[in-house]
Image (cartoon, grey):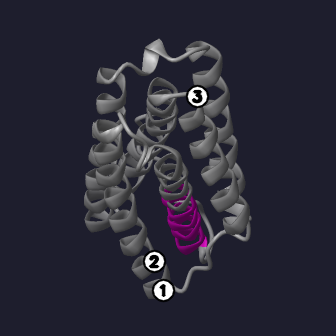
């Protein structure tokens, strides 16, 4: 994604429509991320020998829940509907979390790294787009992005690249995230 500022679309209501897309997709992303961490916690949260990752997952899930709560409020404030695919993203996120956690701590971290890399890039593009016309929202999203990048960095430090099949796992998860972003903006 480009770091260039994207001018607002022409036409009546275009800026509001773009804001709706931004908030809808961000809400969907935070909802999916929270579900991934819940799935990972379901497997690793109480498992003996996994106390370290269990604590990390709990902290990252708390960040996602805080982001989601703020996006809920913004969507209500701007009268924006969530994605119609929210139930699917919840189930898919939970399944992805469970699946990667069953593969082990490194795979759970690889999932986090892949997801948060895409989300960090996505937030960066939105921040650049909104910086001039919605500076307060851009600043909030910058805070969210910083949390996501911290999750990514923690996952990398914890051995995400050592996961079995890391290149494939990372590529598939990243592609899935990018597809979910495009779909959630519109539906």
Q: Any magenta on residue 15?
A: yes
Which residue is tagged 3? Answer: 103
Give the SS element for disc 3.
Answer: loop
Residue 180 coordinates in the image, percent (x, y) = 67, 48
Name the residue rendered at 52%, 27% in the picture. 107
Which quadrant of the structure image shows residue 174?
A: top right
Which residue is tagged 1? Answer: 76
Name the residue rendered at 38%, 39% in the picture. 48
Q: Nearer the viewer, residue 30 or 62?
A: 62
Assign the magenta stretch its main secondary structure: helix
Q: Nearer the viewer, residue 74 or 138?
A: 74
Which residue is tagged 2? Answer: 72
- Between discs 1 and 3, the one toward the N terminus: 1
Residue 26 coordinates in the image, percent (x, y) = 50, 59
Please tell me how crowded label 3 is: few (under 14), some (14-19), or many (20+) other residues with Cα within 10 Å.
few
Give the CA separation, mark 2 to mark 3.
32 Å
Relative vertical location of residue 181 with respect to residue 165 in this rendering, above or below? below
Please tell me how crowded label 2 is: few (under 14), some (14-19), or many (20+) other residues with Cα within 10 Å.
some
Residue range of the region highlighted in magenta in the rendering: 14-30
Name the residue rendered at 59%, 35% in the picture. 102
Residue 63 coordinates in the image, percent (x, y) = 32, 57
Res 171 label = none
Q: Any magenta on residue 22?
A: yes
Give the SS element for disc 2.
Answer: helix
Residue 68 falls left or right of residue 93: left
Residue 111 coordinates in the image, percent (x, y) = 52, 33
Q: Nearer the viewer, residue 48 or 45?
A: 48
Relative vertical location of residue 151 with respect to residue 159 in this rendering, above or below? below
Give the SS element for disc 1.
Answer: helix
- Between discs 2 and 3, the one toward the N terminus: 2
> Badges 1 and 2: C-beta atoms under 8 Å apart?
yes
Q: Nearer the viewer, mark 2 or mark 3?
A: 3
């Amino acid at each position: 994604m480009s770091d260039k500022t994207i001018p607002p679309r022409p036409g009546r209501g275009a800026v509001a429509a773009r804001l709706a897309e931004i908030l809808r997709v961000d809400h969907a992303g935070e909802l999916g991320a929270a579900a991934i961490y819940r799935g990972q916690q379901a497997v690793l949260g109480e498992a003996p020998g996994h106390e370290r990752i269990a604590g990390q997952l709990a902290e990252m899930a708390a960040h996602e829940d805080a982001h989601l709560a703020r996006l809920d409020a913004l969507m209500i404030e701007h009268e924006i509907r969530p994605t119609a695919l929210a139930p699917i993203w919840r189930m898919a996120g939970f399944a992805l979390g469970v699946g990667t956690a069953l593969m082990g701590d490194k795979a759970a971290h690889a999932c986090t790294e892949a997801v948060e890399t895409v989300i960090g890039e996505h937030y960066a593009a939105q921040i650049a787009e909104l910086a001039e016309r919605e500076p307060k929202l851009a600043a909030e999203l910058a805070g969210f992005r910083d949390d996501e990048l911290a999750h990514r960095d923690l996952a990398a430090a914890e051995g995400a690249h050592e996961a079995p099949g890391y290149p494939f796992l990372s590529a598939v998860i990243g592609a899935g995230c990018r597809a979910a972003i495009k779909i959630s903006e519109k539906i």
